[in-house]
Image (cartoon, rainbow, N blue to C red):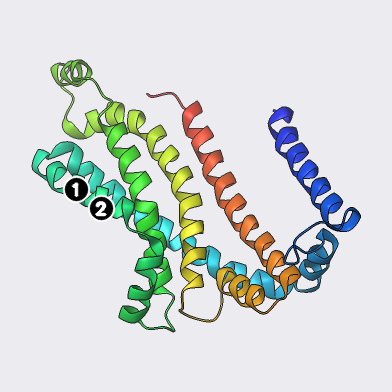
Amino acid sequence: MWQRVAAPVAVGVLMLGVWVLIVDVLHAAPRALPSPTAVINEFVLRIGIISEDAAITATNALLGLVAGALAAIVLAGLAANVRPVDGMLAPLVAAIAVVPIVALTPIFNSMFGASSQFGRQAVAAIAAFVPVFVNVLRGLRQTHPVHRDLLRASGAGGLQTFRVLTLPTALPYLMTGLRIAASVAVIAALVAEYFGGPADGIGTSIATYAKSGRAPLAFAYVIGAIAIGLTLFIVTSALERAVSRRKPV
């Protein structure tokens, strides 16, 4: 267990050491790359306002993740049980998977208003939808016909078959999809904040301060973005690990 924690920490420390070496010792860094000390000072000095913007971005990502995941679960369930629905959804999901976020954000801002957070949440939901849908659909199709026939022969109804066989089989796939979708939703919410909308959020602040030449403060906001992504990733990974340890009834 400790090796899983020590390895990424060691890599992070190594990268920080290389950063300090390039910027503070060799003075060979590009002009836009600030010193780690300056970044940490800005982060500590402005942690209050960074936390407020991080809360907005995290809320958008979380709402998008929940909405996208719920829609994906419902549609994957329909696709797994109704063949015509599967045929209709397959090209639609493929199209959604390749739609660029930067193209959707300005459209949603125009549709819902530049002062609304809904456009950003919708972008995060669309981004989270695909990995959850693909994984849940795959999980629902993992049950073997012989197992379903055995339960049917034993007198089990449709609901009992779902509870005993289908759900335990599909649940680990759902958790995997949520873990992937959590990171994608955060990225989508951050990218959406670059392209208009309300003047708050981590992405908006990074873009603003980077353009104004305040690189240390922009990097301090990047730390806030990393914290959001890591938090959601850790939570969903813990859920996935808990589910994977649970044995089907």
Q: Residue at x 44, y 23 (%)?
A: 247
Residue 205's place in the image compared with 147, above or below, is below
Q: Residue at x 82, y 62 (%)?
A: 35
Q: Position of residue 129 (x, y in %)?
A: 34, 52
Query: 180 left or right of 38?
Result: left
* Residue 203 at x, y percent in the picture: 56, 69
Q: Nearer the viewer, residue 127 or 249?
A: 127
Quadrant of the image occupied by residue 175: top left
Residue 115 image-quadrant placement: bottom left
Left or right: residue 109 versus residue 212 is left
Spatial CA distance of label 1 from label 2 is 6 Å
Instruction: Residue 32: give x, y in percent of width and height.
Output: 72, 66
Q: Which residue is mark 1?
A: 91
Kind of residue at disc 2: Ala
Check contact, mark 1 vs mark 2: CB within 8 A: yes
* Image quarter of the N terminus: top right
The residue nearer to you, when weighing 146 against 132, is 132
Mark sitting on residue 95: 2
Helix, strand or loop at label 1? It is: helix
Position above or below: 113 against 66: below
The three-letter amino acid code for the residue at tag 1 is Pro
